Amino acid sequence: MKLSILDQSPISAGKTAQEALHTSVKLAQLGEELGYERFWIAEHHDLFGLACPNPDVMLGVIGAQTKQIRIGAGAVLLPYYKPFRVAETYNLLATLFPDRVDLGLGRAPGGSAEVSLALSDNYLKQVREYPERIEELLGFLHGRYPADHPYGKISPTPVPETPPETWLLGTSEKSAILAAEKGMDYAFGHFMTDSDGPEIVKRYRENFAKKPGSERRADEFSHGKDVTKSNTETRDARQVNGLGHGKDVNSRVEPRVIVAVSVICAATTERAEELALSSFLWSIQQEKQVDHHVVPSVEEAKNYTFTEEEQEKMEKMKNKMIIGNPPEVKEQLVTLKEQYGADEIMVVTIIHDAEAKFESYRLLALECWKVD
């Protein structure tokens, strides 16, 4: 079973944002050591004590301190940015760290309405233009613009030998269908939604299969052909050899699916449930008007008196999480993978204590990959 890591750089009570970001770097290094497939870091803006507003910067740091693990954004919130700028940034990362960079795309605000206003002149308009922005971005990354197009004259330099892999992230049928229409890989946020995830992923696969010409396009790109090129226009040598070298790693014959799930694993079920208390309290506090949304300690969570309504919310949260000892967690992950037909499971773990978080990922890897 392929396992990956999604990190949100949460700030724990008693710790600083700097410490949270350094913990993210250490987690990526541990993930590489243990054999995790990829490490993605999320983008959030002034939200719930999450320390990373800019995955691009963090990926430069993480890439320089790792060697093999794939690194990526989960996700770049595309409505805030011009596609050419995103293409330049991730081409730069893919040049520095060859064949290791993922570019996850999302359209969520990642913060409050005030944050959206501060980041964008017209966020809602740009959300409506999200499909067109994706197409524009893919055009820049893979050289899909014909020579007579204004964008056919420019390149998002530096152009890497292998472009970043582009994933579309989502939690709804709308995002699943969009990923299928674009011929993109899809990452579903199981931990973020109450929707029928397996049914949504099924719709993604069904619509991907219906995509006209997807198999032809993937085959032609794999042989270095640009199927969007005009029959009467030929790119100059700079463009043909520059924009993706004729490769299009996102035009696939078969769809790929990652399912992201919240996991807390410990040596015993009791310890895992104890660690989860701080995560539950953190989620509940997000709904309240408090000054600092940091992850509380287990001790604070134990001393907190949960109301009946909050206890009901906790039970709902448990239904979307996997909490337990290594064999229990593995069994549930295998079941989840089968329910979704997922190619890969991406794990997000929110624990106050960094060492306990590292141990959760360590125990999970050892259990899932041990030789019987």
Image: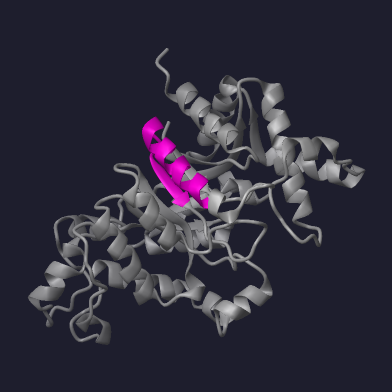
Compared with 315, 362 (above or below) is: above
Rendered residue at 28%/56% (across/down): 249
Which of the two residues, 166 or 270, is positioned nearer the viewer here? 270
Q: Position of residue 19 (x, y in %)?
A: 55, 49
Identity of the residue furthest to the top in this view: 372
**In which quadrant will I find the N terminus?**
top left
Identity of the residue furthest to the left in this view: 237
Compared with 92, 197 (above or below) is: above
Rendered residue at 61%/56% (across/down): 50
Taken as a whole, is the magenta stretch helix, strand or loop?
Answer: helix
- Is 193 one of the magenta-colored residues? no
Which of the two residues, 344 or 33, is positioned nearer the viewer here? 33
Q: Position of residue 215 (x, y in %)?
A: 27, 55
Rendered residue at 65%/62% (across/down): 47
**In which quadrant will I find the C terminus?**
top left
Q: Position of residue 355 (x, y in %)?
A: 56, 33
Quadrant for residue 45, please give it. bottom right
Q: Position of residue 343 (x, y in %)?
A: 42, 40
Res 213 seen here? no
The region drawn magenta spans 21-40
Using residue 194 as the reference point, say whether residue 19 is left or right of it: left
Which of the two residues, 108 or 255, is positioned nearer the viewer here? 108
